């Protein structure tokens, strides 16, 4: 699963360039808003994608602004946490899932 350059943002964490974007909302029905999250991959050699769940509710109702946003400093912290927990972004494999609220 590679991120499209058009829909992703660039971030450099500890000298390594990554691309990231807010992920599509996981929700089962209209009344369940799901949680806010994002996906990250290494820009030079896309491999295993990092899928981060912030544990914060996502506000997706029409006409309402999200109560919380995903900021680059949070993405950088998520990348560092995932790397210390075994994420190897340059290798092939299934997505590496990280729940930040569990840390």
Image: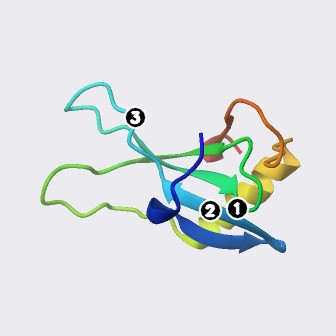
Q: Which residue is mark 2?
A: 19
The residue lying toward the viewer, choosing from 58 and 15, is: 15
Q: CA distance from mark 2 to mark 1?
A: 6 Å
Q: Residues within 10 Å of mark 3 (few under 14, many from 20)?
A: some
Residue 43, which numbered label? 1
Give the position of the C terminus as an image quadrant.
top right
Residue 16, which numbered label? none
Q: Residues within 10 Å of mark 2 (few under 14, many from 20)?
A: many
Element on which disc 1 rests = loop
Residue 26, which numbered label? 3
**Compared to 25, does 79 lie above or below?**
below
**Compared to 72, does 68 lie above or below?**
above
Residue 54 percent location from the top left of the image = 54, 48
The nearer-to-camera label among 1 and 3 is 1
Q: Are marks 2 and 1 in contact (CB under 8 Å)?
A: yes
The residue lying toward the viewer, choosing from 20 and 4, is: 4
Q: Quadrant of residue 72?
A: bottom right
Q: CA distance from mark 2 to mark 3?
A: 21 Å
């Amino acid at each position: 699963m590679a991120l499209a350059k058009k829909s992703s943002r660039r971030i450099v964490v500890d000298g390594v360039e990554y691309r990231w974007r807010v992920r599509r909302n996981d929700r089962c029905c209209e009344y369940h808003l799901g949680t806010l999250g994002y996906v990250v991959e290494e820009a030079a050699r896309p491999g295993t994608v990092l899928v981060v769940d912030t544990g914060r509710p996502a506000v997706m109702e029409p006409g309402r602004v999200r109560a919380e946003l995903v900021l680059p400093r949070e993405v950088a912290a998520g990348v560092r946490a995932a790397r210390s927990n075994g994420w190897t972004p340059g290798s092939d494999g299934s997505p590496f899932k990280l729940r930040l609220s569990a840390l």
